[in-house]
Image (cartoon, grey):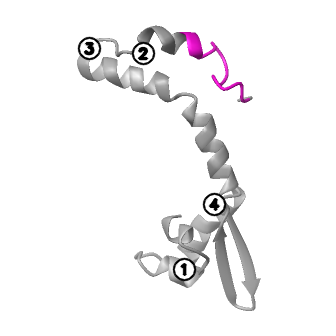
Amino acid sequence: MARLALGPASVGELAKPFSMTLPAVSKHLRILERARLLRRERAGWYHNCFLVGQPLETASQFLEGYRPFWEETLAVNLTGRPGPTSHHVREGIPKYGCPTGHPT
């Protein structure tokens, strides 16, 4: 993913830094394709891969709504005391669902 953030790359380029076979790398890429995080274009034998950023942005926005909860939880676990946002955290997160109103 980090390599694709720099621009498109072939499967061979993506595989180069790893001690994996091309079929193993392709299997990982298929998983990213199914998650719609990667798009492949085939040109003969070459497969060029492109990062698809929108699903990551959507996930980031969803998770950002939980940041106060996790920061508070971490503060309690590390110090044994509630953090500065403790009285706001539980009010902002509904019993079920996302605090931003995004459907889960």
- Looking at the rendered image, the disc whose residue lies closer to the viewer, 1 or 3, is 3
- Residue 66 screen position, x and y as percent: 54, 28
Circles 1 and 4, Cβ within 8 Å, touching? The answer is no
Residue type, label 1: Leu
Cα distance, mark 2 to mark 4? Answer: 36 Å
Cα distance, mark 1 to mark 2? Answer: 48 Å
Secondary structure beneath label 4 = helix
Residue type, label 2: Thr
The residue that label 2 is drawn on is: 85
- Residue 38 screen position, x and y as percent: 66, 64
The residue at 35%/25% (across/down) is: 74
Instruction: Judge whether 33 appears above or below 102 on screen.
Output: below
Cα distance, mark 1 to mark 3? Answer: 48 Å
Of residue 57 and residue 13, the one placed in the foreground of this image is 57
Which badge, 3 or 4, is on the more N-terminal residue?
A: 4
Cα distance, mark 3 to mark 4? Answer: 39 Å
The residue that label 3 is drawn on is: 80
Label 2 crowd (10 A; few <14 / some 14-19 / many >=20): few
- Looking at the rendered image, the disc whose residue lies closer to the viewer, 3 or 4, is 3
Of residue 48 and residue 72, the one placed in the foreground of this image is 72
Circles 1 and 2, Cβ within 8 Å, touching? The answer is no
The residue that label 1 is drawn on is: 22
- Looking at the rendered image, the disc whose residue lies closer to the viewer, 2 or 3, is 2
The magenta stretch spans which residues?
91-102
Cα distance, mark 2 to mark 3? Answer: 14 Å
Label 1 crowd (10 A; few <14 / some 14-19 / many >=20): some
- Looking at the rendered image, the disc whose residue lies closer to the viewer, 2 or 4, is 2
Label 4 crowd (10 A; few <14 / some 14-19 / many >=20): some
The residue that label 4 is drawn on is: 32
